């Protein structure tokens, strides 16, 4: 079933107000108990589905008691899930009952609102995009040790502007998307007084309409999910060098509808959470070679109710 126009507008509004696609990183290179493959969080869903390839083989899921907005893996290969009720859920192995949960709903210490991204730095510290609280939180572990806040309100340009996504590169530099102002920031630390930034609202070069997700590859290439322009963007640095786009509005090959998230694997394939088309798209390069899709609308096997995050575990 296809999203109708009114539903699309609602979904886009929710995207701007709430969601972010939170998986990003290609995953841990280790002996994780989780299978290698593609991991997907679904809008209006309470689980992370995972598959061993883009064709949907060996489908399994980890369920939660709340809407799941994002997922990521730490260096030990454990699955972290971010929810809309202020919780981070760590699942150590497939189907494990020994989950660790951190956070409650709120705006204080050890509290989150809607968690729209989880990322890790080189020493394993956890970064959280706490969207409705308009902040980034860093903790050492899931007991909340060394709770540190980067308030993003000083960098907002309107009362609703908030951080939808965060990526942390190999040098522990942070890249943060501000949703409604359509800007990407680069912070050298949690106390960086002069972060670099780029982006504005529009349809042209260096412009976005609903900048939802950022992913930084191991070679420091930046990928961005531009919901309203139905495209993803690749660039070489915060200055926008090498600006390249892929996608146009629609349902066919090379077309996207509300792309919420983007990531890559170690072979350079690009994975896109194509929310409005209820599917994951994979391409070999930014020209769209090797176009492959998986998914349809629904709640059954191989189906999604809007794909809001995708990550690759290797």
Image (spheres, rainbow, N blue to C red):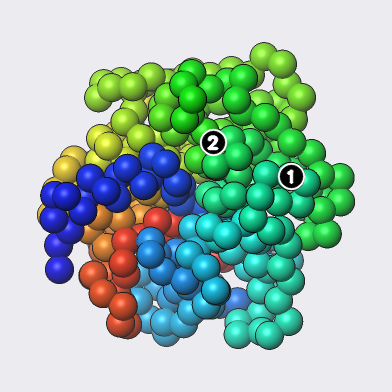
Q: Residue 144: where, in percent of width, then height?
A: 81, 53
Instruction: Answer with the quarter of the image where residue 245 lies.
Output: top left
In the figure, 151 relative to 31: above or below?
above
User: Does residue 279 sit above or below 144 in this rendering?
Assistant: below
| Left or right for 127, reference 61 | right
At horizontal 42% and vertical 21% (from top left) the residue drawn is 199
User: Can residue 62 be seen here?
Assistant: yes
- Judge by depth and name the residue closer to the eye, 3 or 122: 3
Identify the residue at horizontal 66%, vertical 26% (top origin). 187
- Identify the mark nearer the N-term, 2 or 1: 1
**Is residue 148 toward the left or the right of residue 51 in the image?**
right
Residue 163 circle label: 2
List the single residue furthest toward the right.
145
Q: At numbered mark 1, what does the secondary structure look like: helix, strand or loop?
A: loop
User: Does residue 302 appear left or right of residue 211 in this picture?
Assistant: left
- Residue that badge 1 annotates: 108
Quadrant in which the C terminus is drawn: bottom right
| 3D distance between C-alphas at marks 2 and 1 | 17 Å
Q: Is residue 294 left or right of residue 206?
A: left
Foreground label between 2 and 1: 1
- Residue 306 point in image, percent of width and height: 32, 61
Q: Picture quarter containing residue 153?
A: top right
């Amino acid at each position: 079933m296809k999203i109708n126009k009114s539903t699309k507008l609602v979904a886009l509004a929710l995207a701007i107000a709430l969601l972010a696609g939170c998986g990003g990183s290609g995953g841990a290179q280790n002996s994780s108990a989780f299978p290698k493959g593609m991991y997907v969080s679904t809008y209006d869903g309470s689980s992370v589905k995972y598959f061993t390839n883009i064709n949907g083989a060996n489908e399994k899921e980890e369920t939660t008691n709340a809407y799941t907005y994002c997922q990521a893996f730490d260096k030990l290969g454990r699955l972290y899930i971010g929810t809309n009720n202020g919780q981070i859920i760590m699942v150590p192995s497939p189907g494990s009952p020994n989950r660790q949960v951190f956070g409650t709903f709120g705006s204080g210490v050890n509290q989150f609102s809607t968690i729209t991204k989880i990322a890790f730095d080189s020493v394993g510290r956890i970064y959280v995009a706490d969207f409705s609280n308009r902040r980034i939180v860093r903790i050492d572990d899931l007991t909340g040790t060394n709770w540190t806040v980067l308030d993003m309100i000083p960098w907002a340009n309107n009362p609703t502007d908030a951080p939808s996504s965060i990526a942390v590169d190999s040098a522990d530099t942070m890249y943060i998307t501000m949703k409604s102002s359509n800007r990407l920031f680069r912070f050298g630390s949690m106390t960086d007084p002069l972060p670099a930034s780029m982006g504005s609202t529009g349809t042209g070069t260096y412009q976005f309409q609903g900048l939802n997700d950022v992913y930084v590859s191991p070679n420091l290439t930046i990928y961005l999910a531009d919901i309203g322009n139905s495209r993803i963007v690749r660039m070489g640095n915060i200055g926008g060098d090498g600006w390249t786009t892929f996608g146009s509005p629609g349902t066919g090959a090379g077309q996207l509808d509300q792309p919420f998230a983007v990531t890559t694997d170690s072979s350079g394939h690009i994975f896109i959470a194509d929310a409005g088309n209820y599917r994951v798209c994979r391409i070999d390069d930014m020209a769209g070679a090797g176009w492959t899709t998986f998914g349809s609308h629904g709640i059954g096997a191989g189906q999604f109710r809007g794909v809001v995050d995708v990550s690759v575990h290797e």
